[in-house]
Amino acid sequence: MDSTSQPNGNDRPPTSRSQSNTTSSNYIGKHRLTAIISQHNQQIQLIQEELDQLETLGEASLVCGQLISSVESSTDALLPVTRGPADGGWDRWFQRANQSSSSRHRRRWI
Amino acid sequence: MSSSSVSELKERHIAATETVNSLRQRLNHKRLQLLDTDIAGYAKSQGKSPVAFGPTDLLCCRILQGHTGKVYSLDWTPEKNRIVSASQDGRLIVWNALTSQKTHAIKLPCAWVMTCAFSPGGQSVACGGLDSACSIFNLTSPTDKDGNIPVSRMLSGHKGYVSSCQFIPDENNYLITSSGDQTCVLWDINTGLRTSVFGVEFQSGHTADVLSVSISNSNSRMFVSGSCDATARLWDTRVASRAARTFHGHEGDVNSVKFFPDGNRFGTGSDDGTCRLYDIRTGHQLQVYSPPHQQQGGTVPDAPMVTSIAFSISGRLLFAGYSNGDCLVWDTLLAKVILNLGSVHNSHEARVSCLGLSADGSALCTGSWDTNLKIWAFGGHRKVI
């Protein structure tokens, strides 16, 4: 689906380009500029915090090791090779005992 | 007011913009320095071998037919076998996926639905869409004279469409929505009120429509959101004023976000045709999953967009639906496509718009613009070690 914004999320006053009054257009210009500068200052603070934090973070390789461990120690019904224990309920999708004359291939587990 | 103070402000604006840009560059550079490897590089260096599926290992074992329009969203119950789906036909259908039977068909007051979710207890379903509201239906309610289940609660307040909704795990009375109004909201269903609005202050959150949310299973106070502003953001539900972290990298709308099973990572799927895996603690982009036909590091015009993603229960497999009908199964550790469910027997005949794993991880459900849902499970020889 298209992801277009609704037009009504903006709290700032609209700028009218047809206004010829210099004073009011200056006021609106100051108001907008002040708001934008304030946003930028907020962003500067956030980015600086993140930069400071990065000094203490390890490299990606450390994280990769943790991720691989967590994946390999988990059981997964959709993998051809998986850590146990297997759950008998995993096979319920192929047990068609309630269906009559199913043309689907029936599988059993030993 | 004198014009000189306007020009002063303009200078300050220029200076601030330059500072933001140069800090961002430093941040990107520093991050790149810390990316000494991606997951695939690391896994290969450890000698990991890819998952290998035989041709009939992952089989379509159920086709759920009943919608008369495109399927847009689906969600499983925590108790294994039921699914709720939402469609362009203006209905929610609740299925018993094991028997293929429909247990409920809910005709929605607003037909333009985009998302649906099952409550943790399985007694309620939620949906939302272009009406900018999230509606709750109690499945045990008596039907009205037309045979419809009435809305038991309507959550109103968003100023744009509701793109995604999810109940907080183990909480039947709280859910999170994402919206075209650029915010996410935590709702108290009992009161119908917004407990928190994430990103409402200007520039503290997403800067475009939010398309997707995913709540961590291991820490239900954390959730991620994906947006048309090409970022994903991590939120702490106790801190609505600003995102805990913003994740850059995508070059298009982030259509889908999903927490990794271990709760420390999450995946994304985007209009730029790639999926990515991010680490929430460090912010590192750990892996890019770029289909073989795409050039590395750049976008190809008309590359298929990723519509939806899900991880298998261990995280070893990443399922991704694309706008061209592909449904790729990725080995997450080796970043290799091991199967395309879009080109096997019984594949969907149109775009896969949504997908999700059953609670025990034994089945994948895909929903498509071809109006059907399909259930896929492992039907090959399984080796348990």
Image (cartoon, helix red, strand yellow):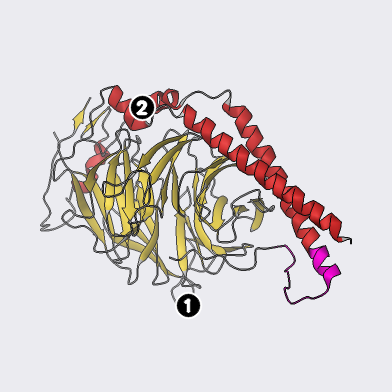
Residues in magenta, as a range: A11-28
Residue pointed to by mark 1:
B145
Residue pointed to by mark 2:
A68
Q: Is residue A97 magenta?
A: no
Q: Is residue A41 above or below residue A70?
A: below
The image position of residue A4, as x and y in percent, is 52, 66
Q: Residues within 10 Å of mark 2 (few under 14, many from 20)?
A: some
Type of the residue with mark 1: Lys
Tell whether B380 sits left or right of B197.
left
- The residue that appears at 79% across and 64% down in the rendered structure is A28
Type of the residue with mark 2: Ile
Location of the N terminus of chain B by quadrant is bottom right
Answer yes or no: is residue B186 visible.
yes
Tell whether B94 sits left or right of A34.
left
Q: Chain of mark 1?
A: B
Give the main secondary structure of the magenta stretch: loop
The verdict on a common chain for dots 2 and 1 is no
The image position of residue B152, as x and y in percent, is 56, 64
